[in-house]
């Protein structure tokens, strides 16, 4: 049994909830960004992801709690992905945007490939709970680093593609 999710069907439901909330967060990204601003969105995505990871690592002892943790992680990814793409689009000239998005996608897939190689030993050493707790801490550290970078560099206007 893995934190209360002991069948493939239950795992599929948790993943479906995570995906549904990622879709919802992404669909409302432009509206939320216009209301909250980029800094608040970084804080929101970081906090939601870290709490979801902590719940998975520490407090998930049943299906309902796993659904909540999965939903928080999904919502976090639904915020992070558009933030990342918007940042890349702002950082490159228009004529290089296609190549930049291609490189970003490649980086995401490389991360998926490297993830088990780098984090597998951590999970073997620390167990699932320790693994998720370490990832939650890394999420917070990267969020703080991002906020520091944004505050030093200064906010940029929202790209026209993000405006309604």
Image: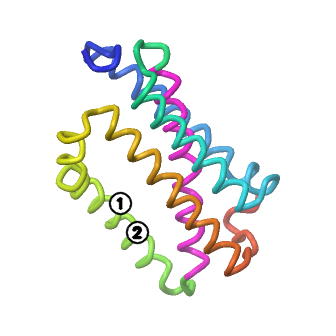
22 or 76: which is nearer to us? Answer: 76
Q: Which residue is drawn at 73% across and 55% down?
A: 40
Which numbered disc covers residue 12? none
For label 2, the residue is 104
Please state, as top left, top right, bottom left or bottom right, where the C terminus lies in the image. bottom right
1 or 157: which is nearer to us? Answer: 1
- The secondary structure type at the circle numbered 1 is helix
Q: Is residue 50 left or right of residue 12?
A: right
> Where does the magenta region start and end?
66-91
Per the image, is 73 magenta? Answer: yes
Is residue 103 depicted above or below 15 in this figure? below
The image shows residue 88 at horizontal and vertical percentages of: 53, 73
Is residue 74 depicted above or below 66 in this figure? below
Residue at the outermost right position: 35
Q: Residue at x 74, y 49 (%)?
A: 32
How many numbered marks have been drawn onto this rendered protein structure? 2
Alpha-carbon neighbours of circle 1 within 10 Å: few (<14), some, or many (≥20)? few
The image shows residue 117 at horizontal and vertical percentages of: 17, 54
Q: Residue at x 25, y 39 (%)?
A: 126
Callout 2 touching callout 1 (CB < 8 Å): yes
- Kindly report the distance in space between the C-alpha atoms of the residues bearing marks 2 and 1: 6 Å
The image shows residue 131 at horizontal and vertical percentages of: 32, 41
Which numbered disc covers residue 108? 1
Is residue 134 depicted above or below 68 in this figure? below
Q: Residue at x 48, y 13 (%)?
A: 64
């Amino acid at each position: 049994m893995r934190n209360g999710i002991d069948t493939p069907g239950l795992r599929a439901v948790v993943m479906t909830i995570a995906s549904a909330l990622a879709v919802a967060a992404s669909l409302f990204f432009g509206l939320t960004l216009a209301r909250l601003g980029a800094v608040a969105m970084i804080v929101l995505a970081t906090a939601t992801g870290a709490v979801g990871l902590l719940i998975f690592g520490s407090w998930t002892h049943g299906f309902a709690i796993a659904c909540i943790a999965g939903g928080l992680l999904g919502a976090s990814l639904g915020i992070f992905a558009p933030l990342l793409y918007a940042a890349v689009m702002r950082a490159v000239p228009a004529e290089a945007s296609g190549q930049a998005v291609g490189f970003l996608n490649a980086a995401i897939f490389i991360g998926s490939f490297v993830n088990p190689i780098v984090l597998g030993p951590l999970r073997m050493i620390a167990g699932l709970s320790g693994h998720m707790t370490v990832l939650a801490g890394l999420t917070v550290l990267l969020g703080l680093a991002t906020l520091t970078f944004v505050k030093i560099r200064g906010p940029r206007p929202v790209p026209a593609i993000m405006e309604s």
